[in-house]
Amino acid sequence: MTMETDARSLSSPDRKMWVERVPAAYWVVGFILLILPSFASDFVMFQIFGWTFILGMIACSLMFLGGYGGMVSLAQMTFAGVAGYMVAIFGDSAIDTISQGWPWWVTVPLALLIAVIFATAIGWLAVRTEGIYTIMITVAIAAAFFYFTRQNYDIFNGFQGFNTVVPPPLFGVNWRDPMPFYYMTLMWAVITYFAIVYISRAPFGLALQGVRDNPRRMAALGYNVTAHRVAAYAFSAIPAGMGGILLTWQSAQISPGTVGIQPAIDILIIAVVGGMGHPIGAFIGAFLYVLLKTFAIDVLIALGLSGDRFQLLIGLGFLVVVYFSEDGLIGIWQRIKDARNRDPLTGEPRL
C-alpha cells in the first residue's frame, strides 16, 4: 500500500518535471523567437524586436513595482537613463574629453550599481507617500534629471549628450549587427522575465505582495514595510538599468531626450496596456507600442490621412485596450480563456 501511495504521489501533477509544467504556448513562442532571424529582415530583428525587448525590460521594472508592490513609479526611464549615461561616461564614446574609456566588464556592472543606488535613494523618498503623491514625486525626479542632464556640460555634455556609444566587440562579434543584437536583447529579456517571476514567488516577493495588500497587517506580523518597498525600488533598477544600457547601444547615443518626461510616460502606457498582473504583459505592451510607433504614419497615409496625426492613432489604440480591459491585453486574453472554459448554457466553469 505504501508503494502504491508513493507511485501515485510521484505521478501526481505536483510531481511533474518543470518541462511539463511550462505551457505549450510558451514553447511555441520560444521556438519562434529562436528561429526568427532565419526568416526576418534586419529591420524587424533590430528595430522591431530589439526595441520591443528593451522597452519590455524597462516596463517590467514598472510592472514589478506596480503589480507586486502597488507603487506606480514614473522614474523607471530615469533609472534606465542613469545606467545608459554611466556606460557612456565611464566607457567609450565620441566625446573622449569626458568618457573615461574603461573596459566594459567594469563599466556595465558599475553603471548598474549606480542605477541601483540612485533608485534606492529615490525609493527611500517615494515610499513615504501613496497614490498620486508617489506619482508626483517620481515624475518630479524624472523632470529634474532631464533638466540636469540638459544643462550640465562637464559630466553629461548638455543637450548633445554622447554619441558613438556601441557595445564592445566581445568574442570578436559586432553586437550591434542585427542578428547578434537581436539575440543579445532576447537573452536579457528572458533573464528579466524569469528573474521577476522567480522573485514574485520567493519569500521577498510574497512579502512584498502582502505589503501591497495590507501594509498594517504585515507590519504587525513583524515585516519592515518601508524596507521591503525600498528594496523593491532597488531591484527594479536592475532590469531598467540593463534596458537603458541596451537602448544606448541600440541607438549608439544617449541624450536628455532619452530620459525626458514623454519616454517616462510611454513606459507607464506600455505597462498598463500590456497588463500589470504578469511580467509578460510588459513585453506584449512594448510590442504593440513599437508596432504603432513604427507603422502608424504608414497606416494613416494609406488611408489618405495626414501622417502628422500618428500620435492620435497611437493614443486611440491604447485607449481602446484600456477601455475594454482594466488589466490591459492580459485581461482581455484571460476573459477569452474564461469564456471558452464556461458552459454556454449555464455559464458555469467546466470541470
Image (cartoon, rainbow, N blue to C red):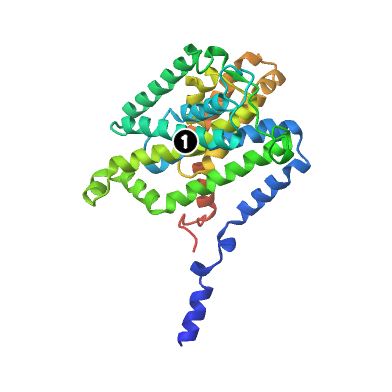
The spot of residue 271 in percent (x, y) is: 49, 35
Residue 136 picture quarter: top left
96 relative to 224 in the view: left or right = right
For label 1, the SS is helix
* Residue at image location 62% in from the left, 32% down from the top: 51
Q: Exactly how many numbered labels are in the figure?
A: 1
Give the x, y percent position of residue 148: 45, 16
Q: Position of residue 112 (x, y in %)?
A: 50, 35
Question: Amino acid type of disc 1?
Answer: Leu
Position of residue 124 measured from the top left corner of the image (x, y, whole percent): 32, 33
Which residue lies under the disc numbered 1? 113
Up-down relation of residue 11 to residue 168 (above or below): below
Question: Mark 1, residues whose alpha carbon is within 10 Å: few (<14), some, or many (≥20)?
Answer: some
Name the residue: 38% across, 21% down: 140
125 sits to left or right of 30: left
Question: Height in image: 282 above or below 34?
Answer: above
Q: Is residue 131 visible?
A: no
For image coordinates 73% across by 43% down, the residue present is 36
Question: Between residues 197 and 175, which one lies in front from this camera angle?
Answer: 175
Q: Nearer the viewer, residue 163 or 285?
A: 163
Return the residue nearer the eye: 79 or 68: 79
Extreme residue toward the left, this view: 220
Q: Is residue 124 visible?
A: yes
- The residue positioned 31% from the left and 26% from the top of the image is 133
Q: Quadrant of residue 257?
A: top right
Is residue 61 placed above or below 100 in the rendered structure? below
Closer to the camera in the image, 84 or 110: 110
